[in-house]
Amino acid sequence: MNISPPPLLPPNTESTRRFTKNLLKPGSAAEIRQTACNAVRHSIATVISSIFCLRMTRLSIPQTKCL
């Protein structure tokens, strides 16, 4: 069975135009940048916290070495 990927939407769809138009409003682009920045910060903090917890768990077990 050959499954082809879904077709890509043309770049000038209504939602793309609306998004681009909204970017022209004062503060909209800055708000989107800030939201993206916060999401990245949260993701990085979550990953670092998970790695730290994993390493601390490994260190507390004498037979296991921390990588």
Image (cartoon, grey):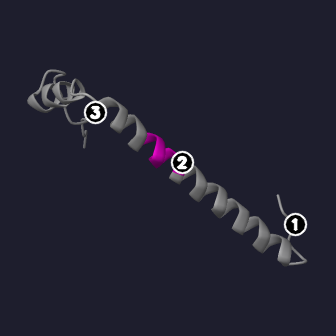
Between residue 26 and residue 32, name the one nearer to us: 26
* Residue identifier under label 2: 41
The magenta stretch is 36-41
Q: Disc 1 vs disc 3: which is toward the camera?
A: 3
Sequence-first disc among 3 and 2:
3
Q: Residue furthest right?
A: 62
Q: Which mark is residue 28?
A: 3
Percent x, y of residue 8: 21, 29
Q: CA gap, disc 3 to disc 2? A: 20 Å
Q: CA gap, disc 1 to disc 3? A: 49 Å
Q: Is residue 8 magenta?
A: no
Residue depicted at x 9% and y 29%: 14
* Residue identifier under label 1: 65
| Residue 47 lies in quadrant | bottom right
CB under 8 Å between discs 1 and 3: no
Q: Specify the amino acid type for callout 1.
A: Lys
Q: Secondary structure at mark 3?
A: helix
Residue depicted at x 65% and y 61%: 49
Sequence-first disc among 1 and 2:
2
Q: Residue furthest front?
A: 26
Between residue 55 and residue 19, name the one nearer to us: 19
| Residue 48 lies in quadrant | bottom right
Percent x, y of residue 31: 34, 38
How many residues crowd around disc 2 within 10 Å: few (fewer than 14), some, or many (20 or more)?
Answer: few
CB under 8 Å between discs 3 and 2: no
Figure check: 12 above or below 36: above
Sequence-first disc among 1 and 3:
3
Q: Is residue 39 magenta?
A: yes
